[in-house]
Image (spheres, rainbow, N blue to C red):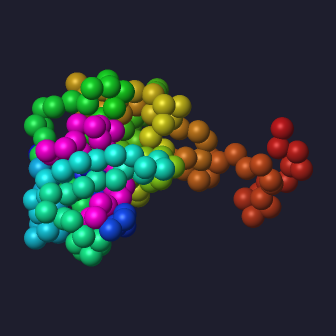
Amino acid sequence: MQLVVGRIGKAHGIKGQVTVEVRTDEPELRLAPGAVLMTDPPSVGPLTIADGRVHSGRLLLSIEGVTTRSGAEALRNTLLIAEIDPDELPEDPEEFYDHQLIGLDVVTADGEAVGEITEVAHLPSQDLLMVRRADGREVMIPFVQQIVPEIDLENQRAVITPPPGLLDAEDAVLAVPDPARGDTSEDPS
């Protein structure tokens, strides 16, 4: 199974180093010296990691055969893809690979069916579970402990405790009354 572990960013310096947007919780394993990674676009790779270091909070990698700034710039926006065993699990039991989550049934804590996870979106601030409802609508569920307290891989389900309005906008609790919805109260408390 293939897993995207990073995206090459800008060149750094004049000796061919690249910045990397890390997309794995295990960069020390997936982006270690000697790692051979497939790429998207495929014509760029495979690439072998020669060395790596963190500089000002950013991961910098040296790629075998890339020794100039122009060579590094040519790799910009290339996705780095690791081949992993589909049965392999992350070291931390609270972490999951995307392929483990996609296809899980989503239910509320009281057992109400919500839908199925179709995608995991990795945003800078947090990850989102994209869930297709039975009626075809798609909802975005923040993948945080307070809202997704349980992932049960054995039973192929994710249990959620959604705040009001997350699944259905009409259930939202507004801080300011909305006359268009028939809210007339001045004080929401």
Could you tell whether 13 is left or right of 90 in the image? right
- Indicate whether 86 appears above or below 44: above
Q: Residue at x 31, y 61 (%)?
A: 18
Could you tell whether 67 is left or right of 131 in the image? left
Question: Looking at this view, is 110 or 116 the one in front?
Answer: 116
Range shown magenta: 15-35
Residue 101: percent from the left, percent from the top? Answer: 28, 40
- Indicate whether 81 appears above or below 69: above
Q: Quadrant of residue 62?
A: bottom left
- Indicate whether 96 appears above or below 180: above
> Exactly how many numbered labels are in the figure?
0
Q: Residue at x 48, y 31 (%)?
A: 145
Residue 39: percent from the left, percent from the top? Answer: 16, 61
Residue 186: percent from the left, percent from the top? Answer: 89, 50
Q: Residue at x 82, y 43 (%)?
A: 188
Does the magenta portion include 58?
A: no
Q: Quadrant of residue 115?
A: top left
Question: Looking at this view, is 7 or 98 the one in front?
Answer: 7
Quadrant location of the C terminus?
Answer: top right
Question: Looking at this view, is 38 or 102 the one in front?
Answer: 38
- Indicate whether 100 appears above or below 165: above
As drawn, the residue found furthest toward the right would be: 186
Could you tell whether 26 is left or right of 135 in the image? left
Q: Residue at x 22, y 24 (%)?
A: 154
Quadrant location of the N terminus?
Answer: top left
Say whether residue 15 is visible: yes
Could you tell whether 50 is left or right of 46 in the image? right
Say whether residue 141 is visible: no
Residue 10: percent from the left, percent from the top? Answer: 37, 67
Does the magenta portion include 19?
A: yes
